[in-house]
Amino acid sequence: IGCTIPTKQNNQNIRLGKYKMARKIFITGCAKTGTTLLLRMCFGFKDTEVAYRTGFNGHELPLSEFVNLDSDKRFLIGKRLPPCVLSNLEEPEFEDQIEWIRKNDIGIINVIRDGRDVVLSDGNYVKPERYLSAMKQREKYSDIIDYEIRYEDLVKSPNRIQENISNIFGIQRKNHFS
């Protein structure tokens, strides 16, 4: 059993020195799968801005807002605010989101977790229909996922996950995830 599931080779247009624009990486996944944990761990990368806003949900951004962000860092990492593809019950706006991801060459890290834990976590916050829809979407839209991480692997082998992210996206470690 592997620690992670890479699903797509990524064509990167990263320039060394001065950057025309930051390489954007967006974290998706159903609620309660570990997306917030992964986002916070991303502070362990060099030359990386982790997108945060003020307020209660400051760690989550609509994809439409993330697409328009810029950074003077080499990498910009954000996390989905529902409704977002690979995270919710499927909605018509997801087709636009898929187009934005492709058009802007946004790297996608999708986080998954055992569905029993997701549904039972936090007082049944996530309904089974939402989880199942997110899992079906990962098959339907597998071509946009650059890297998929199992929550169980993230907590068991965080440094291995960090190394895989580094290798896939060309991002350098500043501090170990653990």
Image: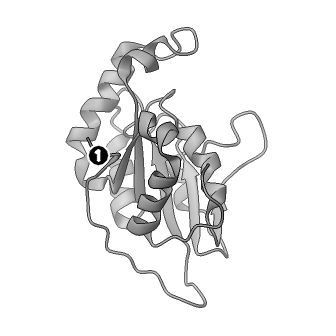
Q: Position of residue 9 (x, y in %)?
A: 27, 66
Q: Residue at x 59, y 47 (%)?
A: 39
Mark 1 residue element: loop
Q: Position of residue 35 (x, y in %)?
A: 52, 39
**Disc 1 target residue:** 2
Of 152 and 119, the residue lying toward us: 152
Q: Residue at x 29, y 31 (%)?
A: 135
Q: Is residue 84 above or below residue 117?
A: below
Q: Is residue 31 visible?
A: yes
Q: Position of residue 51 (x, y in %)?
A: 65, 55
Mark count: 1
Of 14 and 6, the residue lying toward us: 6
Classify 10 Å Cα crowding around label 1: few (below 14), some (14-19), many (20 and above): few
Q: Is residue 80 above or below residue 9?
A: above
Q: Residue at x 21, y 39 (%)?
A: 139
Query: Which part of the image, by quadrant, shows the N terminus?
Result: top left
Q: Position of residue 66 (x, y in %)?
A: 56, 55
Q: Residue at x 61, y 42 (%)?
A: 60
